[in-house]
Amino acid sequence: MGFFKTVAVVTVFSVCEKFLGFLYRIFLSRTIGAEGIGLYQVALSVFALLLTICSSGTPITVSRLMTKYRAENREDKVKKIVTAGLVITLLTALPLCIFFFVFKGTLPIIFADVRSANIFLVVLPGLVFTSVYAVLRGVFWGNKDFLPYSIIELLEEICMIFVGVFLISRATTAYQGAFRAGVAVLVSYVFSFSLATLVFIIRKNRLKNPKTELKPLLASAMPVTAMRTANSFIASLVSIILPMRLISSGYTESVAISAFGAAAGQALPILFIPTTIIGSFTLVLVPEISENYYAKRNLSLKTNIEKAIKTSVLIASFCLPVFFVMGTEIGVMFFGNADSGKFLSYSAFLMLFMSLSSITTSILNSIGLETKTLVYYIIGAVLMLISVYVLPSFMGIYSLIVGYAFVFVITTAFNLRLISKKSPIKIEYGRFSVLSVIFIVLTSVFGLLLKGVLLKLLGPILTIMAVGIILVAFIGVLFLAFDLVSIQAFKQKVFSIFKRKRLTQ
């Protein structure tokens, strides 16, 4: 399967998965409300921290080392590195899971609301299952076997939705609904683990004594794990500190949890839409970048890095104006919550930096610069914590936007600088990025004017649809007019795929 076709297939599955997840998020918001979402979000943020410790660095490192060893014609090490990944993950996940069950009486120290602690405990067994699945996912990446991974991810989402809807629709309180949503998460983790294990065996993957690869894997995985653990740790701290600071600023406990739920549980997942779309592209491209780097194919390395950065900017450029202009209406329509819509609108500019931060971090990690990306993240994270501690008295929940701006803007700037220094051939993306920002501003201004006219005539739902379509078309024309996007090149790619199909039939 060619690169372009692989990206298309992975993107289709990824978009379907995230779209279903978005619909499920709407269902949760409508059923258990902002307070239930807040309880659920706090519990999952702590669980995510443990999951990050167990499996965040190992899968991507297994994938990268598999690619490296194959580029060096050392196939014997591939089975060892896979086994090493599974061993390290199990030796981390099992003790953590046991520890929190044995000392569950101490959880109120971590959770301000004991209800979140109960939700956390029901999800906790999934730590072992989903950590092992994460390593198997890394094996699929290393083998460039993206179709099984994409299918399993989609089926996991479908499993969670079916179980969640069945259980939550019978809940009578916000807490009961949030608790049952946790049960649905656990069931989906067990399901994806079982399916991935079956595919791993069917694909005839084999294990081998990992003794010689345990140390190299740990050395390479630790910086990635540290960065992602810091990310999850910061998210967990924010989920605890921000509601507390809001309460100290005059919010009631219920209002503080609801405000956090509206921002972190409803608006933020929408902000990650461009990053999610880019994720499928990254999934396929990053192994190529790693292979080019280790094989010293410098021209291909330059081309792929430029392709990654420009694609990230392009996708964010299409999404950002729509959510900036129609954020409030989107929040009301999907979540029945104007506060989440306002937060979405005010923070829409973050989409560009989220996308660039994600893609550039992946690029640097794929060429062995994990320690650098960790340092950059920590700088931004410290400033984020300061923001959510100091600013709630002045800005309320919107202090979270300032915090995220520090994280993503700083990591983007430092990452791009490091990529330019490490690339053997100069990376060119400046003109594309500057023009993209100008297009975003022009499209947003046009969108605000358009919204003012259409909202009175069409109402919110039709206005969201009309403005979204018109703004995407408007900015698309700008990209075409300045020759930043080539339809002809796209047509040639599609034509070459169909031509290869006809030749093989």
Image (cartoon, rainbow, N blue to C red):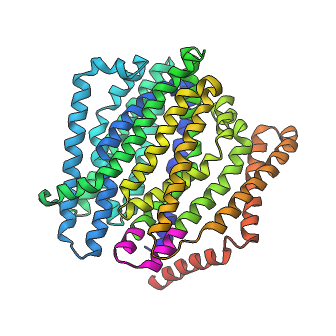
Q: Which residue is drawn at 49% across and 58% down?
A: 415
Between 29 and 159, the residue placed more toward the observer is: 29
Residue range (magenta): 289-306
The residue that appears at 47% across and 62% down in the rendered structure is: 418
Percent x, y of residue 427: 54, 71
Left or right of 20 on screen, residue 468: right
* Residue 214 versus residue 93 in the image, above or below: below
- Residue placed most toward the observer, 277 or 481: 481
Q: Is residue 432 depicted above or below 298 in this figure?
A: above
Name the image quarter holding residue 342: top right
Location of residue 353 in the rendering, given as x and y in whole percent from the top left corner: 58, 51
Q: Is residue 295 magenta?
A: yes
Residue 40 lies, with reference to residue 156, above or below; the image says: above
Q: Can residue 300 be seen in this view?
A: yes
Residue at screen point 62% across, 74% down: 490
* Quarter of the figure that contains the N terminus: bottom left
Vertical placement of residue 378 versus 139, above or below:
above
* Residue drawn at 19 percent across, 63 percent down: 79
Residue 332 part of the magenta segment: no
Q: Is the magenta stretch mostly helix, strand or loop?
A: helix
Q: In this view, does 368 lie to the left or right of 7?
A: left
